[in-house]
Amino acid sequence: MSASVSAWSDVARFIESAGASTVFGIPGDDLSILQALEGGQVNFVVAKDQRNAMFMATGYALAARKLSFCIVGKGPAVTNTLTGVLESRASCAPVVVVAVGTARNRLGARAFQELDQVAVIRPLVKWAFRVEHADRLPWAIQRAAFVATNDCPGPVYIEIPEDLAESVPTQLHYDARGPHHPNISASATAEVGAFINRLERPLFLLGGGSVDGRRAASYGELASRVDAAVFTTASGRGAINERDPLFCGLAGLYTAEPLRVLWEQCDGVVSFGSRLEETATLLMDAERLRGKVLQINVVSEEISSVYSGPAIVSSCAGIANALFHGYGFERKPGWSELIRERKALAFQARQLGVEHARQSNDLQMAAVIEQLEKSLPSDAILVQENGLLDMWSYFYPYFTLGPEQQSIVPSEQASLGFGVAAAIGAKAAKPDRPVIALVGDGAFNIGRSDLSTAVDYALPVTYVVLNNEGFGWLEYQWRKRGFATKRFAFTSNLASHGPGVAHFPVDGTGQISRQIAAALERNKQGQCAIVEIRTNYASPAPGVEAFDSV
């Protein structure tokens, strides 16, 4: 860290004390933060776009499961982060956004880029604060970090006025507090245990809050004790080994058709760390399950009022571990047999789908996803988008995440381009692990301006781009309305890129594994890589068309 003297030195010292190896953003005109970090242990990745910088910071936070930082200028620099801040909040990613603000003596005088930034960003963050006095800066950044990482994690905002940045830094020692672990009460554990024991056909839903990174949760072991069918939300992947015999895939929109009967026949749901958002609950009948949905979440604000039943405010992993180690349960053999039967049917349907896809002259997604699963390294971090084709990777058993692999997905907001930039942040967080981003060409084109950023900062990522020459999901919706002509088509020249990026085209299923392996080899040499899978395929995953609301 440089010996420069400014308030940004306080910020730099706190970032180092928090253990962040990388921060993201585009600094304001006063480059003091860059000077303060110069020569230290923290790398400042200067993005090409503030929105992408927030996506990177979110990807870093989700991959590392710890605090991340995004630093930007003022006015439009702040408004340009808002989509990223929205995604960070919905993803429960602990990101501290630090922005420059108009000087205190210029407020209200139509200063250059003046904006009430706190008012603009406050609805999207857990806490927003403009520092008006130099002696409040240490308190503010420590409070921001604590708020960001505790209860339900999320973004926070600190604003440093331009004139305050010139203040002499404090000599305080920064105490980088870790996340607070909520207490696990015996009464709450007993209530959950009694609820489960009353069920004959239990179903567990594991949301993003079940993957808290603080304890070794025992969801799979607990499910085996009670013969519960286990589903996850997209952000809950990783909470249970997807090769567990009771794992039944992702909930709602992403549930394979043979496994949907489990939602129809379960007599109760235990939700661990899910907001019960629309996409995950398309198969949940609120009337049939009246009083039969028990929700566990770390804060009361995340409890859904749409579904009735007991609500427990507590650590999900803590409750699961307490139940597994200290509560007796009755087995449900008839229910577990139905789970096995429906899973067998799901795998049969997958096999038929893959065989049909292999026989086609065109690249079809069932075969593409099969090859992707086979090609991913066992320790890969898969960063995803949420378009028509990449959505296939959400469908079990078409795609199964390995026990040591990690999935990073957009939130329910599904911000287009999130995965493209978040993959760079994930690589910064986990430089020793291969990072593969599965994205559509629409998302890739939105985020590709920062491909050179990944190259410049030695953050090599492999992008598997599903190129169907357009916005596939919108084309699908257009066809549903009876139109045969293409409405959202465009051409992407993915072979055109700057230095440090390798391009591997794929025109047949048999090339996928070989080209991904070649791309990952280029990553080891410090290069980014694009595996371009060219396809005319334009159909959603099986069962999606059954939902009128999507």
Image: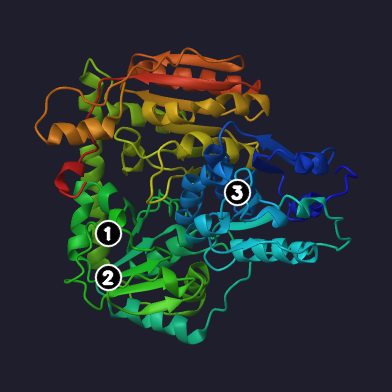
Counting the numbered discs, the total is 3
Disc 2 or disc 1, which is closer to the eye?
A: 2
Farthest residue in the bottom direction?
Answer: 187
Up-down: is 208 above or below 323?
Answer: above
Q: Earlier in the sequence, mark 2 or mark 1?
A: 1
Q: Is residue 377 visible?
A: no
Q: Is residue 178 visible?
A: yes
Q: Residue at the spot x=28%, y=20% of the render?
A: 363
Up-down: is 356 above or below 147?
Answer: above
Closer-to-camera residue (178/199): 178
Label 3: few (<14), some or many (≥20) within 10 Å? few
**Where's the N terminus, which quadrant?**
top right
Residue indicated by mark 1: 281
Type of amino acid at the residue the image marks with label 1: Thr
Residue 80 in the image, given as x and y percentages of width and height: 52, 42
Disc 1 or disc 3, which is closer to the eye?
A: 3
Residue 35 placement, left or right of 98:
right
Residue 223 in the image, given as x and y percentages of width and height: 39, 65
